[in-house]
Image (spheres, rainbow, N blue to C red):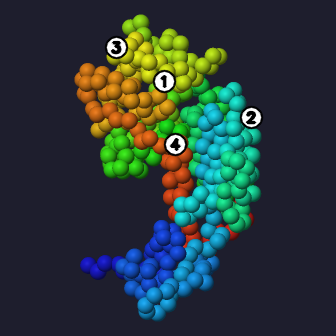
Amino acid sequence: MSSAKPSLDLLRSLTEEHVLHALMEHGRLTRAEVAALTGISKPTISEGVRRLVDAGLVVDTGERSSGRGRAGSYYTLAPDSGAALVVSITPHGVVAEAVDAFGEVVAATEIALARDAGVGAVGLALTRAVAEIAGGGRAGTGERAGAGAAPRLRVAVVSAADPVDRGTGRLVHLPDAPFLVGDLDAPALLAGAVEGPVLVDNDVNWAARAERASGDAGAVGGSHDFVYLYLDEGLGCAVVSDGEVRRGHAGLAGEIAHLLTEGPDGRAVRLTEVFAHLGLRRPGSTAIDVELLRKRIGEAAAGDSTLVALGTAVLGVLGAAIALADPEMVVVGGAWGRDVAFVDELRRRSAELPRPVPVVAALDGDRPQLSGARAAALHQLRESVVAAVRAPGGRLVDRQSPR
């Protein structure tokens, strides 16, 4: 039986994809350098680069290599390759970035929010932040974070400190949620500014993806199966199985605030109510007072009632997560979840569980949810650039194309 041979068009397309991936990883390369990196012959790479230049996807930088041998021209992606919009919505504010296909943040801005901000205020802050990015971007001090023309936003990834409906990307308001954003519709708000798809997920899932992407250097040590407990002003959990975050049917998996656990008086209560019993909520809010909680933990001696009560309550959630998800380990993140004294207490108490697993603190990183969303946005952007070689005519989709 004879096997089908790949068509010439397919082979050309694969070569062009290799060229684009190499340029996105290294910024600028000569044709000889691309050939060396990809293992594809120099003549084949030269033809691929020529086609990409003709299609407007790649440009000659005008620079030439130096040193021994024949000088080579440096090539890079076309200036209109575009950028990915990355947005993080938290109780403190809206952060927006534009990331180019090389992984560089070319524009950024941050809009502060009042603690009682609702869906209207958050929507206005999101719209303003994206307008600033689309106009060239500002850093937090009001200065431009990137040079050159305003970035063309091809895709968007949004992280939100609220549950997210998997089907629509709208935020979902659950009872006692500390961040009262309501049903903010981020995809609709961004439709006029972004050419392609808008991916929305909650901040805990993005933080877990950042933890997973850290590989052997991170807390998970390359594990593909772990539970990520996020303990901050709000409470959340992400289940990573076979390397993927499991979002659930509606996207609401991991909403642990209402799980029943043991309260300070030994009775069964919902996890969120434990903090009310301990006087650790912000006045007039269901948000946890992180500063007060960490102060109490810092002052606690072994056997302190607050530390024991918190350990007992979270241990109940941890036991349920282990029973249902069967993780290799549990990673604890969040402003107070990563506290050394609390992690030690939880690690010690977890030995009491019928199925104990290692408990480790999450990476010591700033805004892990933004890191996770940024990595996903970069992947989406690069895929959209590479997809152009498969499009009829092999050109980047025009910015006026239907969405």
Residue type for callout 3 = Gly
Q: Which residue is mark 3?
A: 303
Nearer the N terminus, badge 2 or badge 1?
A: 2
From the viewer's side, name the closer residue of 288 and 260: 288
Residue type for callout 4 = Asp
Q: Which residue is mark 2?
A: 120
Q: CA distance from mark 2 to mark 4?
A: 27 Å
Nearer the N terminus, badge 2 or badge 4?
A: 2
Q: CA distance from mark 2 to mark 1?
A: 32 Å
From the viewer's side, name the closer residue of 22 and 181: 22
Task: Give residue 321's position: percent from left, percent from top.
Answer: 36, 29
Residue 96 visible in the shown view: yes
Q: CA distance from mark 1 to mark 4?
A: 18 Å
Q: CA distance from mark 2 to mark 3?
A: 45 Å
| Number of the front mark, 2 or 3 | 3
Nearer the N terminus, badge 2 or badge 3?
A: 2
Which residue lies at the image location 37% right of the left edge and 46% below the top edge? 218
Q: Which residue is mark 1?
A: 294
Q: Which residue is mark 4?
A: 366
Tell me the element at label 2.
helix
Tell me the element at label 4.
loop
| Number of the front mark, 2 or 1 | 1
Which label belongs to residue 402?
none
Tell me the element at label 1.
helix
Which residue lies at the image location 25% right of the left edge and 27% below the top edge? 355
